[in-house]
Image (cartoon, helix red, strand yellow):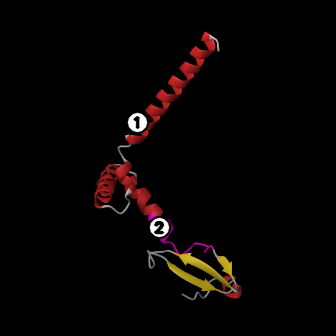
Amino acid sequence: MSRLTSACLAAGLISASLSGAVMAADEGQDTYAWLEDVTGDKPLAWVKEQNAKAEARLAQSPQFKEMEAGIRAVLDSDAKIPGVEKIGDYYYNFWKDKQHERGVWRRTTLVEYRKAEPLWET
């Protein structure tokens, strides 16, 4: 093997080993890895703190309350077309509004769904 080939091979091996070491060091220094514990007390406290900071900053904007009220009005409106999924003979929908903030599963038939005010079974 020539000296040039040996030098190139050595340089390649050194470069590969150094880049591997750098990558390993980068992976070991994830300062936010503790946030992956999504049910842990420390991550949840951090998220609450960040949310409070964000809400305080948004509240300073004169447009924020107006935008929030507009978005809430749309989300709480009954004037929405319910998206449905057909399963068997029924059409199912997960409905959220002011009365059902967490949502309610309901179903109806095709005949009822075609009416202006369908009768839903919950």
Image quadrant containing the N terminus:
top right
Residue 44 percent across, percent down from the top left: 32, 59
Which label sits in the foreground, 1 or 2? 1
* The disc label shown at residue 25, or none: 1
Residue 53 in picture, x, y percent from top left? 30, 51
Q: CA distance from mark 1 to mark 2?
A: 50 Å
Going by the numbered disc 2, the residue's amino acid type is Ala
Q: Quadrant of residue 25?
A: top left
The boundaries of the magenta stretch are 72-83
What SS does tag 1 mark?
helix
Residue 110 position by quadrant: bottom right
Disc 2: which residue: 73
Q: Is residue 10 above or below residue 86?
A: above
Residue 100 vs 16, above or below: the answer is below
In the displayed structure, 32 sits above or below 23; it is below
Viewer-nearest residue: 59 or 6: 6
- Crowding near pointer 1: few (<14 within 10 Å), some, many (20+)? few
Amino acid type, mark 1: Ala
Query: From what the image shows, is residue 61 above or below residue 14?
Result: below
In the rendered structure, the answer to whether residue 39 lies left or right of residue 114 reads: left
Image spot of residue 54 (x, y percent): 34, 51
**Residue at the image position 66 percent from the left and 83 percent from the top:** 113
Give the residue drawn at x 56%, y 83%. 106
